[in-house]
Image: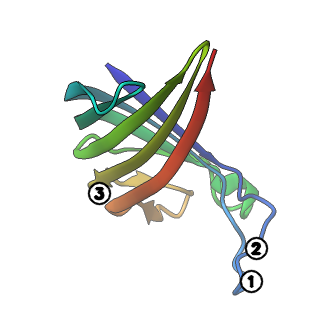
Amino acid sequence: MGYRSLLDKASGRRSTKGTPGVSVNANYYYMPIGISAKYKIFNKIKSRSEIEFDWLIDGARRNYWGYYAEKYSDVTNHQDTGYGIRISTDFIYQAGKVDFCFRPFFRYWSVNDSDISIINDASDEFMISANNTLEAGISITAQF
């Protein structure tokens, strides 16, 4: 089992267009399925590649609308369909007592529409639309 948590503290802030922000706390549970391969490149350099598929099992996203306007209440929406993909390759240089690792990585999440929740006494409906998240970068570490 895997767990992903996101916290966006936007309450009290404004967008570049002046729109007030709403804080969000998202929690996702998923089942990771992946493979890993290790191989030696040179005498002191080895590599490890990994690819993983993450099947979203259950998710909840809490939106703190109460801070935005008094007529709204905080609401939790459930998102239980989607998937993630992770790809990375480690290049590890073994330098005696210290290993240096250079890791390019790619992470992608696709989460479908949430259920619909009521956010005030007037029965205004709210849902989280389907969304995609892409992260790519490089990690550089030293292991002692």
Residue 2, x across and y down, in percent: 36, 24
Crowdedness of circle 2 by 10 Å Cα count: few (<14), some, many (20+)? few
Q: Nearer the viewer, residue 12 or 94?
A: 94
Q: Position of residue 54 (x, y in %)?
A: 25, 36
Q: Nearer the viewer, residue 69 or 43?
A: 43
- Location of residue 90 (image quadrant): top left
Residue at numbered disc 1: 18
Q: At 75% across and 56% down in the image, what residue appears?
A: 67
Cα distance in 3D space between marks 3 and 2: 25 Å
Please name the amino acid that badge 1 sits on: Gly
Looking at this view, is 23 or 16 the one in front? Answer: 16
Quadrant of res 91: top left
Residue 83's place in the image compared with 3, above or below, is: below
- For the point 53% across and 56% down, the residue is 119
Q: Among all residues in the image, which is located at the extreme right?
A: 12
**How far across and down, in percent of the image, does residue 11 sit?**
75, 58
Give percent across and percent down for residue 74.
61, 48
Disc 1 from disc 3: Cα separation: 26 Å
SS of the residue at dot 1?
A: loop
Residue 114 shows up from this direction: no
Q: Which residue is found at the position 36% from the left and 25% from the top?
A: 43
Tag 3: Cα neighbours inside 10 Å, few (<14), some, or many (≥20)?
A: some
Q: Which residue is mark 3?
A: 113
Residue 14's label in the rendered image is 2
- Bin the neighbour count of mark 1 within 10 Å (Cα to Cα): few under 14, some 14-19, many 20 and up: few
Labelled pair 1, 2 in contact (Cβ < 8 Å): yes
